[in-house]
Amino acid sequence: MLSRCKPRTLFKSAHAYRAFSSLLRSPITKDYAELVRRAPASIVVDDSKDLEKYNSDWTGQYKGNSRIVCRPQSTEEVASILEYCSREKIGIVPQAGNTGVVGGSIPINDEVILSVERLNEIHSFDDINGIIQCGAGCVLQTLQAKVANWNHLVPIDLGSKGTCMIGGNVATNAGGQYYYRFGSIHANIIGLEVVLPNGTILDLMSTNRKDNTGYDLKHLFVGAEGTLGVITKVALNCPRLPSARNVAFLACNSFESVCQTLSLAKEKLGEVLAAFEFMDKQVLDQVASEKTIPLTDGKKNHNFCILVETLGSDREHDMEKLESFLEQATDAGHVVDGILAQDTRQVSIWEIRESCNPIIKSKGYNYKYDISLPLSEYYSIVEEMRERLLPFKGDIVVANWGHVIDGNLHLNVITPGKFEVDIQIKNSIEPFIFEYVVAKGGSISAEHGLGQCKNNYLGKYAKSKAAVAVMRSLKDSFDPNGILNPQKFLPSSNSKN
Amino acid sequence: MKILVGVKRVVDYAVKVRVGSHGVELKNVKMSLNPFCEIAVEEAVRLKENKGAGVSEIVALSIGPKQCQETLRTALAMGCDRGIHVQTDLRGDYMELQSDAVAKLFQKIIEEKEKDADLVLVGKQSIDSDCGHVGPMLAGYMSWPQATFAAKIDVEGNGLLVERETDQGTETIRIPKLPAVISCDLRLNEPRYATLPNIMKAKKKKIDTFQAEDFGIDLEPKNKVLEVFEPPARKEGIFVDDVNQLIDKLRNEAGVIP
């Protein structure tokens, strides 16, 4: 099995490229010229320009060798590019904000990068129905700010909101902190405009919440990671902006008490509970090097910290519920300390949670895992992982955080100070972690997706043979030449799965 | 030393205010503890925690509608010992209740209820009326020394040493003995979070309520507000493709470079 998550070497030889895919060919000069003609804002690599930022991901694990980034400024330009590449059998990697962590938007060879960054118009916002229609290249934070002006909010929120784009969020069925409260993207998608690999523009845009006419095609593209079509426009449900927001930061001594606090929160906060995130001491210790953690146990960090957010329409009502919940959680001993944040401080508490990823990335090499597990097994994998890694010399930290309310754990093994991957450590973690997760009925990729990192595990650790076969037939039907994200998402052709 | 801290309930700093027919729209708008008052509370609590200062009690004072009790509870949760609520439904954002009346109410509270107050800490200004008057006016009415825009407060013998921030730089003022009035500026401290145990304890702390009309002060505004309007909408910016285009626009359109 190819080791996926390490820096890629450049595939320069034609022979190696053929091994990549028997159908596709490398783009050449005339192709670049033609693509620039079809999408004038495209950039081709030359002496003065490199495409570093498009060819690499922020985790530093993936590096492509694309020599062009197409930046279409309209759906028609997207269609024109796809039509050409489909006919000429040239691979394409659609790219939005490039904030993914599984290399899904990074070329494996020199595929053409198709960036949706210029499709960033907000077409309309219906503030009575709460539906936004916008281009795939709109940055999430921009959308959030815009709809807030009309007293609405975008139903997803992620740490990468300043960079990620809605098209990418939809293509990856991004989760985030409000999943519990507002549901998945599947639950909020009203319409889509997609360009199919052969250049056909599929207009599935709509402002109808209820429409039972035919197969609901848009759902195929949500989470398809750009392998069935390129999303160019999105129509998304936006809930009303709640007038009352409260953020509490709590400390617990054991994971057991985190679970009990969660249970109590669901019971007492009910419909106003919006987010419930946790962080363990190991990640807090790392974050503390750059941010002030507002709750500490003397000079040490607490074993677990929880961030609870409520969103509701009545301040007094929410505060009553929150105070009752906090009182009970404290009386029962589940929560040993906590703070309630007012105004600006709510943002800084969230920043602590949202900075987990970038801070630990800066500390050393990260072996990143994003898994779903039943709550009863949630932390036991962490403890087992720490045991397994004990024999290794040098500093190894297993830092964990996540959307515990969704059963989603971000498990990160870090080697502070060392930025190179250690194959022995990697082999100690994998496939153990996947087998463990599968045995407990969990998911090996809760929200991060498959990309080029976990696609080869699809058949082995995630879905049945029959399911994978249906997926392949769908892919073949939409993209017979396999131009979109070749060798990603589905198991690659040279894997045994 | 007994400290009296002023805490004002104002429109939350993050709210995008809208102007209606009667001034700024306050209905359903999020209200919070004025950030500068919060700094004043924090300083009072720190003085109390510093054993050398000999602070015996901190009393928080708020003037406004019944929801001021929430504001007082926040102050109590941060460490104040007792609260005083002067109840009035008059708007405190300059539209109805203005600085002179507020300063006089503070004076009445000190003279009638808290005679042994040694130090009054207030925020340098509130973020709704932005006057910054109450501290200096109160000092004037009480004939007490004042130090405004405090960025540092130290206990020195029987008095205080205050560093105050001005546009020209930092000024150090010695207050040789109390009582005195100090208004607090941004850099004085970073207010603490109210922790859960303290929030619970605060529920049991005493808040006394008085009616503003009962103090025999003329609460009518001394200044008449003629008009309240929003500033003109900011024009949307444009994207430029490169530095040359930027220079061209700055030079030829905006005319701000030669």
Image (cartoon, coloured by chain):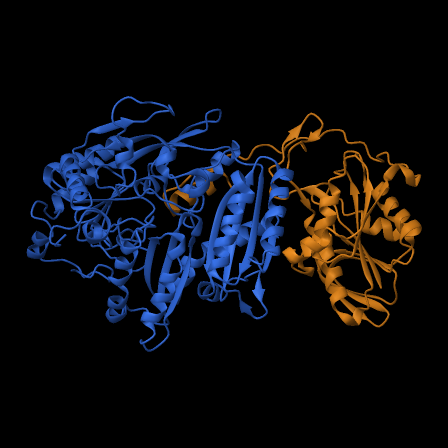
Please give left or right for residue A495 compared with residue A414 in the image: left
Please give left or right for residue A253 compared with residue A191 in the image: right
Residue B9 visible to the viewer? yes
Please give left or right for residue B177 compared with residue B247 in the image: right
Q: Position of residue A394 (x, y in %)?
A: 35, 77
Residue drawn where x is 32% and y is 57% of the image? A369
Q: Which quadrant of the structure image shows residue B117?
A: bottom right
Residue drawn where x is 28% and y is 32% of the image? A218
- Residue situated in front as seen by the camera: A77 or A347: A347
Residue A141 visible to the viewer? no
Vertical placement of B197 versus B72: above or below? below
Q: Position of residue A418 (x, y in %)?
A: 33, 71
Q: Position of residue A269 (x, y in %)?
A: 55, 43
Please give left or right for residue A26 compared with residue B88 in the image: left
Quadrant that contains the N terminus of chain B: bottom right
Q: Colour of chain B?
A: orange
Residue drawn where x is 32% and y is 32% of the image? A233
Vertical placement of A240 versus B139: above or below? above
Q: Which residue extends farthest bottom?
A: A393
- Residue situated in front as seen by the camera: B118 or B171: B118
- Total residue callouts: 0
Q: Colour of chain A?
A: blue
Q: Position of residue A456 (x, y in %)?
A: 19, 53
Q: Which quadrant of the structure image shows residue A212?
A: top left
